[in-house]
Amino acid sequence: MAPSEHRLLKFILPARAFAAVRTGTKLWLIECSCGQKRDYWDAGGVRYKAAGQPKTLARCSACGKLGMHRVRKKTEAERREMP
Ligand SMILES: [Zn+2]
């Protein structure tokens, strides 16, 4: 997903709902097989009231490979690193 989808969300959702989606998505990160982790929201993702640990196709900013990234919830420490 591209960050442009965030602009669309902001356009169609009331401000409070947009903030809720942002907060929900900010609990997640995507992880490359090389170990690089990125904030899921900053990577253009949207995740709200969803369960499970899906995979998403993304290009890694560290190793430059296009591949499947794991989407998972941040740990406490990661939430402090990537608020
Ligand atoms: Zn990588």
Image: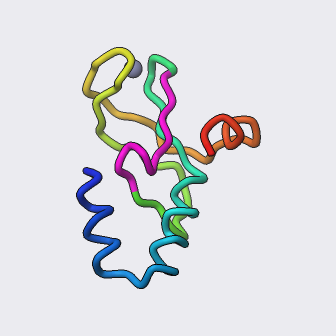
Residue drawn at x 29%, y 39% is 57
71 vs 78, left or right, is left
Counting the numbered discs, the total is 0
Residue drawn at x 52%, y 49% is 53
Residue 67: % across, % down: 30, 29
Residue drawn at x 35%, y 15% is 63
Snapshot quadrant of residue 46: bottom left
83 vs 13, left or right, is right
Q: Residue furthest front?
A: 15
Magenta includes 39?
yes
Residue drawn at x 37%, y 81% is 13
Snapshot quadrant of residue 79: top right
The residue segment tinted magenta is 36-45
- Give the answer, above or below, for where 7 lies relative to 28: below
Q: Which of 9 and 35 is in front in this view?
A: 9
Residue 37: % across, % down: 51, 30
- Give the answer, above or below, for where 56 lies relative to 51: above
Its colouring scheme is rainbow
Magenta includes 27?
no
